[in-house]
Amino acid sequence: MAADDRLTDTAGSGDELARRLRDVYRRVAAARLSPEEKERFTRRFVVICDLAKHDLDHARVRLDAFLADLEAEIDTPGRRNIAECD
């Protein structure tokens, strides 16, 4: 029962990471990426989720790097995002 009482610090830190992982999952799912890019980001995300089962601190670091890469990919204009000009 002690694991479910939410009184330990480790439960709180795990909950925060779980919320961040859920939010990142939604962002990847909603991102307008090519199928290949989406698959690449999805695979990286799954690795981070698996890592979170064993090492929360390392998973946080990897998630921060993942978010930076995702933001750069989404915010960087590509040919698919540029309107055709005359």
Image (tube, helix red, strand yellow):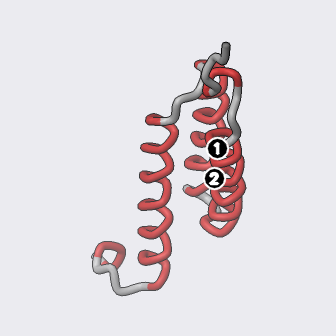
Q: Nearer the viewer, mark 1 or mark 2?
A: 1
Q: Residue at x 49, y 75 (%)?
A: 13
Residue lying furthest front in this view?
A: 86
62 to the left or right of 3: right
Question: Which percent across, then down, holds residue 81?
Answer: 61, 27
Residue 75 — which label? Answer: 1
* Relative to 37, 5 lies left or right: left
| 12 left or right, relative to 82 | left
Which residue is rendered at x = 50% and y = 49% of the image? 24
Q: Residues within 10 Å of mark 2 (few under 14, many from 20)?
A: some
Answer with left or right where residue 19 lies relative to residue 79: left
CA–CA distance between discs 1 and 2? 12 Å
Image position of 18 with respect to 28: above or below? below
Pick the quarter of the image with the C terminus: top right
Of pointers 1 and 2, the one earlier in the residue sequence = 2
Q: Nearer the viewer, residue 59 or 26?
A: 26
Q: Looking at the rendering, which quadrant does residue 84 occupy?
A: top right
Residue sticking out furthest to the top: 86
Residue assigned mark 2? 67
Q: Secondary structure at mark 1?
A: helix
The relative height of residue 41 versus residue 59 in the rendered view (above or below) is above
Number of numbered discs present? Answer: 2
Which residue occupies 63% across, 64% down?
Answer: 60
The answer to whether one can see residue 39 in this image is no
Asked if residue 27 can be seen in this view, the reply is yes
Residue 16, image x, y percentages: 45, 69
Which amino acid, by three-letter code, is at mark 2?
A: Leu
Q: Is residue 61 above or below residue 85?
A: below
